[in-house]
Image (cartoon, rainbow, N blue to C red):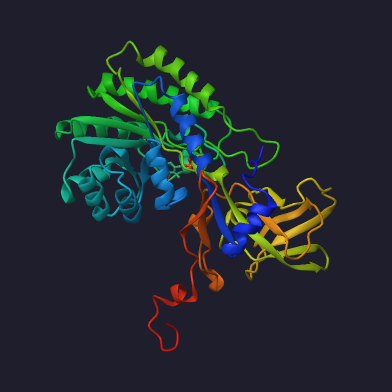
Amino acid sequence: MTSTLPFTREQLEAIAAEHPTPFHLYNEAGIRATARELTSAFSWAPEFREYFAMKATPNPYILNILREEGCGADCSSMAELALAEAVGITGEQIMFTSNNTPHEEFQRARELGAVINLDDITHIDYLDEHVGLPDLLSFRYNPGPRRTGNAIIGNPEEAKYGFTHEQLLEGYRIIRERGVKRFGLHTMVVSNELDASAFIETARMLFALALEIHESCGVRIELINLGGGIGVPYRPDQTPVNLAALGEQVRDLYEEQIASTPLHPLCIAMENGRMMTGPHGVLVTRARHRKDTYRHYIGVDACMANLMRPGMYDAYHHISVMGKEDSPHDHVYDVVGSLCENNDKFAIERDLPAIETGDLLVIHDAGAHGHAMGFNYNGKLRSAELLLRQDGSVREIRRAETEADYFTTLDYPGLT
Ligand SMILES: *Cc1c(COP(=O)(O)O)cnc(C)c1O
């Protein structure tokens, strides 16, 4: 099931008349609806937080919409901390889950009052030495052979993230002795996962682990972060995770494992990125050239620099040819960009309606890891980001790059 488009060809042509293609277009109503659906699925919890993993769509206008819906931010770099602060997400509304972290970033996170989530046992000393230990500290758990991951994030045993089980228990004992008062527990073992049982297993695992930590270290975990990773149904035959049902199943586990223990009440958190914005953004591009050689190519004015998932992960993104949604899909095309890389293809041998140059193409589900993963290789410039607001108006929330932006870090005669 791919997202339905919140505009017609005529409406999109009107937007494109004001804003030249290619551009990313986000749907405010959709982002709000998803945030509400998630929050409502966990409304039973004593406290629930969604820390939006902002690497998916690091635009302050989008972050502000999510803040208004009650979301915090999951940050992992200096610039991401600055973005959170700029939109008024501060204190424990930020979870700082980073790895291989420089102390300047820990310092900034500490100043903002963020929940610092350490990736490794050696970071206890590192944080203590450079910044000091905060009252509240969280650890990222890597279950290793105890869990299987999935294709995007890899097998936990091979993943660079997190503490082992043994290190985790030792780590909580150490920080308790050093005066840390409040404790969090986090893991992130899957990404782009559409099978809800993966998240239920994570909840079961972390609830049991929190009890074990309580028994063996005398530490009462108050915050359990189940991680992000809820997937997007990129393909037409896929279905989204039923959030309400997921919430209910986690609730059952909470009742069973936690409710009658000293760990109750417990704050449950997630840090989804992709599912929050992915289905609510599209990449809009125009067919520029047709080329018929050994295959039939449609060259569009966007390229892999605007959306690298197909080229990088072989990812499927549904494509609509505007105004021809119901025409027979009786042509087979490779839809390609202009990079000098043969993996710069948005679709390979895709059944599509006959495409004329000038047609508007919409590449679906580009609202996460789309613009965000943009790059300048081959002298390509990043596109604009537009927001379709709830009243139907469109606002440019990031302008397109210009040649001057591309040359701005150079000091060379004739180039700036
Ligand atoms: C990327 C990331 C997330 C979000 O993952 P999604 O698949 O976008 O939900 C959450 N937590 C951490 C630590 C991440 O690196």
For the residue pair 273 and 396, the one nearer the viewer reads as: 396
- Residue at the image position 79 percent from the left and 68 percent from the top: 291
Above or below, comparing residue 411 to residue 124 in the picture: below
- Furthest residue to the bottom? 413
Q: Position of residue 232 (x, y in %)?
A: 58, 39
Above or below, comparing residue 236 to residue 370 in the picture: above
- Furthest residue to the top? 260
Q: Position of residue 353 (x, y in %)?
A: 80, 53
| Observer able to see residue 21 | no
In the rendered structure, the answer to whether residue 328 lies left or right of residue 404 reads right
| Observer able to see residue 276 | yes
Q: Position of residue 245 (x, y in %)?
A: 53, 22
For the C terminus, give its image quadrant.
bottom left
Q: Quadrant of residue 45?
A: top left
- Residue at the image position 25 percent from the left and 40 percent from the top: 91
- Residue at the image position 48 percent from the left and 23 percent from the top: 247
For the N terminus, give its image quadrant.
top right
- Quarter, ligand 1: top left
- Residue at the image position 47 percent from the left and 25 percent from the top: 41
For the residue pair 193 and 80, the one nearer the viewer reads as: 80
Above or below, comparing residue 57 to residue 224 in the picture: below
In the rendered structure, the answer to whether residue 92 lies left or right of residue 193 reads left
Q: Position of residue 53 (x, y in %)?
A: 42, 44
For the residue pair 372 and 181, the one nearer the viewer reads as: 372
Number of callouts in the render? 0
